[in-house]
Structure formats: C-alpha cells, structure tokens
Image: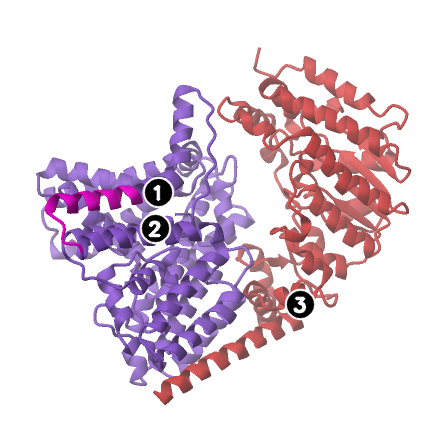
Amino acid sequence: MLFNSYPFILLFLPLVLAGYFWLGRRSNLAPVIWLALASIAFYAIGSWQFVALLLLSIAFNYGIGHLLIVAKLGPSPRKAALALGVAGDLLVLGIFKYAGFATENVNALLGTHFALHILLPVGISFYTFTQIAFLVDAYRGQVAAYALPHYALFVTYFPHLIAGPILHHKDMIPQFEREETKRPDGHLILCGVIIFAIGLFKKTCLADGIQPLVALAFDARSPSFDQAWCGALAYAFQLYFDFSGYSDMAIGISLMFGIFLPVNFNSPYKATSIVEFWRRWHMTLSQFLRDYLYIPLGGNRHGRVLRYVNLLITMLLGGLWHGAAWTFVVWGALHGAYLCVNHAFNALVPTIPSALARPARIGGTVLTFLAVVVAWVFFRAASVEWALRVLQAMADPSHIVFGREEIAALVMIAVYAALVWLAPNTQTLLGYDHANRRVGENLRAGRMRPLFLYGASLVLAFGILGIQSHSEFIYFRF
Amino acid sequence: MRATFTSLKRLLLASIAFLLGAAGLTYVIDPLQLFRPSRSAFYSDDTRVQNAGLIRSQSFDTAFMGTSLAIHFRQSDIDRALGVRSLKLAMTGSNSRQQAFVLEQAIARGARRVIWEMDDFIFVDAADIEADPYLSVDLYRRTPKGIASYLFSAAMAKESLFALLRSVPPLQVPLTRAAPYLPVKFALADVDDIYALPRDVDVAREYNASKTLASFAYITAPSRSRFLGEGYGYQAMVRNFEQDAVSLIARYPDVTFDIYFPPYSILQFVAMRDASPGTLKIVSDLTAVIAERLTQRPNVRLHDFRAIKVVTQDLNNYGDVIHHSPVVDGMVLKWLASGEYRVDPKAPLTSLDELKAQVEVYRVPGLP
C-alpha cells in the first residue's frame, strides 16, 4: 500500500488511528497489538506473498535475541548465537536480493546459462538491517528484554516498514511502551497532518512533477549536452523530493500515533562537503553503516590508509545495499572515493581564512552537488554503459539542442533548485526535535496561525490532487 | 487541547474547500476541452491525454494515426493534400492496442476515413488497454472515474490557473508568447502545432546522412545490436495485429482505412540484416501477413513506401535510421493522394519482395 494513495489516506490511516486510540482507553498492550496487526495488513495489501517471510524473520530474530538477552549463555555460545542470527539474516537477504545478480555474473564469466528469477520482497533491506542492529546490540548487552508484540511492532511499524527510516530499538520500543502515546494528542495529530501534507506534496507534486524530464537523459539513445544535464539534474531533484517526501510522510503519520521517528533527511544538497552530505542524506542508513560496519571494520583507529580502505568497503557495501547491480557498485565506489578525497583534503589543507570561508562554502556546495549528480547518473542508469553514455553527453558541449522542450525543462529545474537551496526544510518549519520529543512549539503558542494553517491546508489539497495511480517511491526497490 | 482539535478540523475543512475549488476551476476552464469546445483553447503535446479532448472538441471526418514517424504532420497539410478534414492523433511510442483504442473513439465521434501509419514494432507488446498506465481509457470514455481524475488533478489545476492568468488582458500577450518555454503543458495556441516541427526548422541540420550513418553505427554496435530485436516474437505480433488492427477494421466496414508502411531509411533493414537477421525475418514474415490480410479487406487501401529507393536510400532524408524529414512528410501525403504506391491486392507481396532484394544487395556508404 502506498502513502500517496486514496485508500491509504481516506480509509486505512483513519481506521487504524481510530482503532489505536479506542483501544488505548482500555489497555496499554492492545493498541500495540492492533498497530502491529495493522502494519502486517499494510504490508500484506501490497506484498501478501512475502508476509510469511516477514513473520519468520521476526520470529527468528526474536528467538536469537531471547538467547542473547534472557538465556544466561557463556561467551562462546553467545558469540555463536549472534553469528547464527546475523548469518541467517544475511543469508535470506543474499538469496532474495543478490542470488540473481551473482548468477548473472557467473553466467557472464563462465559462459553458462543458469536462470534464476527471484522476486525481491519489499522492504527486506530495511527490516533485515533493523534486526541485525538489534542482535548486535543484544550481544553487546545494550538491550533490555522486550515483549514480542513490542518487538514485532518495532520491526513492522508501517510508517517505516517499506522505505525507512532504519529504526533503532532503543529509540522506538520505549515509545511503544509508554501509556501517553495511546491517548490522542491534538497537537501531535495536527503537526503530524501538516508534516504528512508537506511530504505528500513533495512526492506527488514535486517528485512526480519533474519525473518526466528524467527521460531526456536516461531514455534517449543519444542525448545532447543540454538534454543530458537536464535529465541528470531532474533525476537528482526527483530522487531528492521523492525520498524527502517519503521521510516526511513517515514522520507525520507516526506523529499522529504520538511516536517520534528519527529524522532521515536534512537538506542534503545544502551540504558543503561529501562528508556532510552523508550526515544529511539517508541519515539512519549512514548511522547504521557507521555503527555496524565502518567502526567494527576498524574505522579510523588503524591509520590513515586503513581508514580509507574501510571507507571504501563501507560505501561499496552501502552501494550494494541499494541494489544488486554493477551500477550501484560503481555508485558506492564513487562515494567511497569522494569521502577519501574529502578526508585527505581536510587532513592536508590548512584552515581556510575567515574572509574566504563564505566563497569556500559556496564552492564546496557546488562541487559536492556536482559530484553527487555524477554519482546519481550511475544510480539511475539501466547499465554502467548507459551511465557512461549520459556522462559523455554531459561532457560534450558541442552537441546542444536547446529547443522549446529543453528551455521549459531548464525553467522547471531552476524552480526546483530554488526550492532546494532557498526553502526551509520540514523539521525547521515545524520545529521537529526528535531527541527532545518536541514539535510545533510556535504553532502551539499561536505564533503561526492562521495563515500557516491555511497554507498547510492548501499544501494538503495539492498533495491529494497530485496523487497518480502509478507512482511508487524510488526507495521501494531497495 | 480543544483549540488544537479545532485547528485540525479547520485545516481539514479548508483542504476540502481547496480541493473543490481546484476541481471547479478545472471544470470552468476545461483545458482539455472535454466538456465543451473553446475558441480560445490551448493545446498540449502530451498526445495520449490531449487526444481525449481533441476527439470531443474538434470536427473532423478523417483520423490520422501513427507513431513518432507520423507525429510531425500538420493537420492543415493533410487536409490540403487529401481534401479531408483531419484530426491528427499520432502518439510517439504508441502500441497497436493504444492506437486501435483511440481510433475507435474517433470513429465513434464521426471519422469516416482513417489514415494509419503502421510500423511493425507497434505489435511487439501491448498492455491490456483497461489497465494501461500510459493511456486512461476512463478519460476517453468520460466515466465518473475518468472525469474525477481530470477534475481532481493538481496538474490540470495548474494548467487551469495558468489559462486563467493568460486570459487577463495585460498578461495575455506575454504569457501566450512565453508559454511554450514554460513548464506548462497546454502551451500551443494552434491545434496545427501539436508536435509539429517549427516552421523554420533547419532541415539540413536535423536530417542528414552523417546523423543517419552515426545512428546506424550506434544501433549495430555489438554491445547494442541485441536491442534491435528486443521483444520481437512472430506469433505474438501476428496475434496483436489480428486483435488490434484486423478486428477494428472488421468492426467498421463503412470506414475507409488508408494504411501505409512508412519510408524508413534502408539502413533500418540493413541493420537487422547485419546485426540481427532473425529480427529481419520476423519483420518480413509479419509484414507479409499484414499485406496479405489487409489487401483482402474491401475497406482497406494499403500503401507501401519502404522500397522507394530515391527516398529510402538518400540518407539525407533522415535524422536516424527511421525518422524522415518534413520534406518526406510532404511526399507521403502526395503518394497517399495519388495512390501511386498502393499495394495490389492481387500481388500483395511485390513491394516486400522488392524491398528484400534491395536490402540484400545494399552496401552501407563508407563500409566495404
């Protein structure tokens, strides 16, 4: 089921909200079970064939978690239990996500013709990573014993299940356990609706609105210089608003239930360096890769060279996490290389004088954005060869069309660029403070009404008017 | 607490009011002319949507259908050359199912003659028309769902708002001039301009032998040649031809169908010959079936322009291996009017055999 669909907005969400708060008047546990069941129903509506896999994954990880938290095992059995849990998760992920890719490569290398057609279960990357983090923390002794309904809800919680953010048990389960969240809070619901409206508008009007321009570069056999740039920039903005929209919607929906989700997206194109970009883009994935991959690999503790190797490995795996294809490997490798260059630059170049700080920041933002756009070309292209063709066109100003269509595309891209770089992001606009569980204090104090309220209703109306029957989120594929 | 619930109620009610307001605006402006023809209408290049309104709002006796090979024709040229009142409905990249569906709507609205540019690749694959995400049957049929999707649409509300602004006298001229360069869909003031090339297009720059040869080299490169026959399957293509073309023609015996095979450059077939001979065989076999089946229908006139050497072997007529220049558009209309290359029902394969012979002996300039 899609957030940007009429059945979800008009039926599913109001029904689940009503049931949650109605049960909340009677019990503290029943709403949790209700929400977990609703989440499974949400998943089943779009991907019924993978519900069993999701439930098995929950049962398996909860069982391993039980061994690590409750059973008093010695060090070796604990290590074995963790290894079994992580290996089991990675095996399932490997089979469903990477077996086809591996087979293709074996065929290409050995000239064989093995055929493997395995459907990718929606959201498998997200719920697998969520649970691996849980197991590792349980092994480290950082997890208290949780009841099964709370654990099941933590994994399946529908605002995040399909496309993130990647949740952390320490952040979520205590919120599910609190009694206060089961009582409707008008302020949180209002803020949730507004954040959801902004996210919906970003998705249906902005991301879907610019999507047709992407074809200029990626569907054309030989795009011109301007077409390739327009298409690549259009994709950069489409992905930005698509993902940002989804993240906002997830936060907004969750807020209606009184639950604060972590911020996943913080105006990443405003980053002045690639290091900062990764602190602003898909923030929960970056944190996961840092805490459960980069640091266990050794991080920056074993010298500069190994640090760069660790960065490259982390980003290569981060690329593969996004998809089983060489284009994602190249994308990850590029970002790994960017990060290495960025760290080397920081180590070698002395502090910039304050007079040059502003131009340096602007230059850094432009350079970072261009580097990111080049990497997006691989992320979007159907093959490495196709990506190189688009990049070649972007580097060849001798072939320019600049017709009616291209001029209109440029105007549109300029509007999107202005929104990206000049408009405040949702969390700033609403004062969303995940750590302190605060949102919309200005709204509560009456400093933003009524113009803000009518602006929000216009945004919600346009978000609903923009709903199209065929518009999935890009991150659904991961 | 009560105040925030009041705010929430106000927000939701205001949203409903905005939704209804946007729908009302679209209904009044009606950019697609789905409800009523308009003298001050503007048109869009998005033909899969635009056609639904054109069929409703224009008066015509002839429907002109095709793919990107027929998209640049101007209705006024068709009318002048053939003495008809035409409606161009060509859609780039369209398949036979979409074309047949749109043609059927046009016939139901009064088309007595159909001119149909027919490519072999339109029969490759076709989603069920009822579930086709790229063509809304509900919009064409004006079902409640189709009308709702038209009225409750942010894209249409944006177009309506722009049209409203454009109707304000001081803004009229500048906005009309700027519209084609702005990200609005309904930007063309003349129905004749839908997807037509600008009148001052530099034909020699856009269509020339070097572009055609470069395109040939590109599609026949070993890494890409497999795309030449992508999706081609003889049985499925014949089935689609029967289901979409033959059954439509049979359902409307009182409508005359002028169907033509467009004058691709010979390099289209040579590319298949050199890089994908299996595809060439499928294309030949399929067009033989088409020729034999269509020439037997009393209401069909089949024209085959693929073996006219003077055009198809002059590579300066093309922008790539298949798309011809507007000069050739003019020739196509002339040939259709004269019936010069009409396929003889008694010898339906003559022109195909001629084409095969040409393809067999043709040597690409610059290649040994």
Callouts 1 and 3 on one subunit: no
Residue closer to the observer: A87 or A319: A87
Residue closer to the observer: A417 or A119: A119
Q: Position of residue A218 (x, y in %)?
A: 48, 41
Quarter of the view holding residue B344: top right
Majority secondary structure of the magenta segment? helix
Q: Tell me which chain appears purple.
A: A
**Image-based side of A321 in relation to A231, left or right:** left
Chain B's colour is red
Q: Which residue is mark 3?
A: B30
Residue closer to the observer: A226 or B29: B29
Q: Which mark is residue A57?
A: 2
Magenta span of residues: A71-89
Residue closer to the observer: B54 or A257: A257
Q: Secondary structure at mark 3?
A: loop
B162 in relation to B209, above or below: below
